[in-house]
Image (tube, helix red, strand yellow):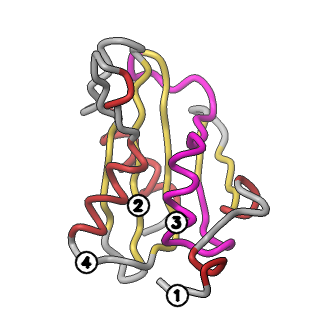
Amino acid sequence: MDNSQLLDTALRAMQSAYAPYSHFHVGAALLTESGEVYTGCNIENAAYSCTVCAERTAFFSAVRDGHRKFTKIAVVGGMNGEISSFTYPCGVCRQVMREFCDDGFVLLFTDGKNVRELTLADLLPYSFSPANLDMEV
């Protein structure tokens, strides 16, 4: 799946977001090493700490199905489901990505006009990972 298709898939996932409090809708499309795509959307809750991000929804669904190796993720977002700027993962999502991905894992973003590609190392330098515990995932 090419970058454009992955971003389009994330955009479709964003349409399922449940964001009655912030009105900020986010969609994610995660590509596994085997070529499967898992999508996620943000799901808010009146007790804010129960809210889950689109990126984690996609990762947790893939892990549930036995996947442990990933190549890239596309993330899109905006107020009321309209993309207006680049939407980057929160710190918790970055750490979840680090659990399963190496420094070269690719993240794709769009502001509706331009596409930005970064690596996990770009977004989370000097991170703590299973390697710090002498573990391999």
> Mark 4 is on which residue type?
Gly
Locate the N terminus by quadrant: bottom left
The earlier-in-sequence mark between 4 and 1 is: 4
Q: With 126 as the anchor, is 45 left or right in this view?
A: left
Q: Which residue is mark 1?
A: 136
State the CA–CA distance, disc 3 to disc 2.
6 Å
- How many residues crowd around disc 3 within 10 Å: few (fewer than 14), some, or many (20 or more)? many
- Residue type at mark 3? Lys
Q: Which residue is mark 3?
A: 72
Q: Amino acid at mark 2?
A: Leu
Q: Which mark is residue 66?
A: 4
**Disc 4 vs disc 3: Cβ atoms closer than 8 Å?**
no
64 left or right, relative to 87: left
**Numbered disc in front, either 4 or 1:** 1
Q: Which residues are magenta?
A: 80-107
Which residue was labeled with disc 2? 30
Q: Estimate the x, y position of residue 61 in percent, counting from the top left.
A: 26, 60
